[in-house]
Image: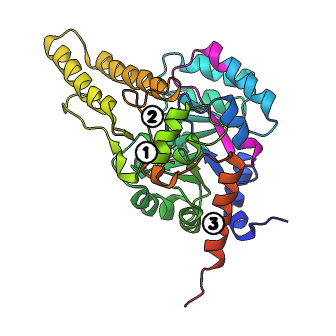
Amino acid sequence: MTAYPKTAALMARGAEFLGSRYAILCGAMSWVSERNLVSAISNAGGFGVIACGAMSPELLDAEIAATRALTDRPFGVNLITMHPQLFDLIEVTKRHRVSHVVLAGGIPPKGSVEAIKEFGAKVLVFAPTIALAKKLFRSGADALVIEGSEAGGHIGPVSTGVLAQEFLPELAEDHIVFVAGGIGRGEAMASYLEMGAAGVQLGTRFAAAAESIAHPAFKKAFFRANARDAIASVQVDPRLPVIPVRALKNKGTEEFTAKQIEVAHALDAGTLDMAAAQLEIEHFWAGALRRAVIDGDVERGSVMAGQSVGLVTEELPVATIISNLMGECETALAGRGRIG
Ligand SMILES: Cc1cc2nc3c(=O)[nH]c(=O)nc-3n(C[C@H](O)[C@H](O)[C@H](O)COP(=O)(O)O)c2cc1C
């Protein structure tokens, strides 16, 4: 018996796919999604995902082992496709028999999906267009995450509401599709589940949870912020391959603009090529996010947060956040069809 029968019915495919009680993923967040948060999410019935980010294979190895020691529930590992040691990282997930690998940050390079599937793990991918999503499913991807521009971190240009209308009618019947970006309450979950989503992915809501190791100043910045404080970075020079990042507006946001101008000048002077320029920008983000999450420098660090940050007003245990989401979703679904 479940306290959430309508929600559970709509989540059944997603929960079966993930091996979790609820089809609620906590999206990988660099520096935040480590052993404590990931195990707490999975122990509470959701699905935690370790953010590998720029970790070395040795560090990832230790993080997976430490997470396993804290939970016997399934969890995933998020790998960034442009990591120079991607295939070594895949080997680490294979050694640990990780059940789900999420490939993020670009089109998976040749052989990567196959290498993961070869040891029996399921592969989750992101795709900005339906054509690319179909191609990835054809080449073996098991599930898709669509993520709208309301989300925290690196974002695309299209809102979750529009992506859901584009992708779900076309793909959700035959494929597992999770919806991410801007989800802060269960009522929003209910709508996407009714549209055919197999489940949802949240980040911002969980980043300030009690079990998150984020610095108290980082969490406090979340509790104070409104939706309109979480802004997308601007691209200063159209040549620069800058993927916009949504974060709370602060001095760090301005420093990023200055960094882009510096990199653009280096491109003009020929001291950097385009690939090196992109790497400089990504290193800037990784360093700035660490400064905010770990050191608590919320003025100059990057406080990545989605627009749902306005709904995050207090530090709650993961289990409470999940039961609130499930309860809100169930109430919304139970109220359907009632007029007046
Ligand atoms: C602080 C922060 C860091 C993030 N880092 C990553 C990351 O390293 N890799 C990734 O694939 N997504 C990352 N994301 C995106 C989340 O995994 C998730 O998809 C997103 O937060 C969902 O939207 P929401 O913030 O509106 O809930 C990050 C998000 C936040 C808020």
Whether residue 260 appears in magenta in the rendering, the answer is no
Residue position marked by numbered label 2 in the rendering? 107
Q: Say whether disc 3 or disc 1 marks the residue closer to the N-terminus.
A: 1
Amino acid at dot 1: Leu
Residue projecting furthest to the bottom = 340
Residue 153 percent location from the top left of the image: 43, 38
Residue projecting furthest to the right = 1
Report if the beta carbon of the residue with label 3 is closer than 8 angstroms to ligand 1: no
Q: Which mark is residue 329?
A: 3
Q: In this view, does 243 lie to the left or right of 206?
A: left
Residue 38 percent location from the top left of the image: 67, 36
Q: Where 118 falls versus 272 (above or below)?
A: below
- Contact between labelled residues 2 and 1, with CB atoms less than 8 Å apart: yes
Q: Which mark is residue 262?
A: none
Q: Is residue 204 visible?
A: yes
Name which quarter of the figure residue 191 lies in.
Answer: bottom right
Tell me what residue is drawn at x 72 percent, y 39 percent: 40
Does dot 1 land on a helix, a strand or a loop?
helix
Q: Which mark is residue 132?
A: 1
Front-most of residues 237 and 30:
30
Tell me what residue is drawn at x 74 percent, y 21 percent: 95
Magenta residues span: 42-60
- Contact between labelled residues 1 and 3, with CB atoms less than 8 Å apart: no
Distance from the alpha carbon under mark 2 to that under mark 3: 33 Å
Amino acid at dot 3: Cys
Q: Where 24 falls versus 92 (above or below)?
A: below
Q: Is residue 134 visible?
A: no
Report if the beta carbon of the residue with label 1 is closer than 8 angstroms to ligand 1: no
Q: How is the image coloured?
A: rainbow
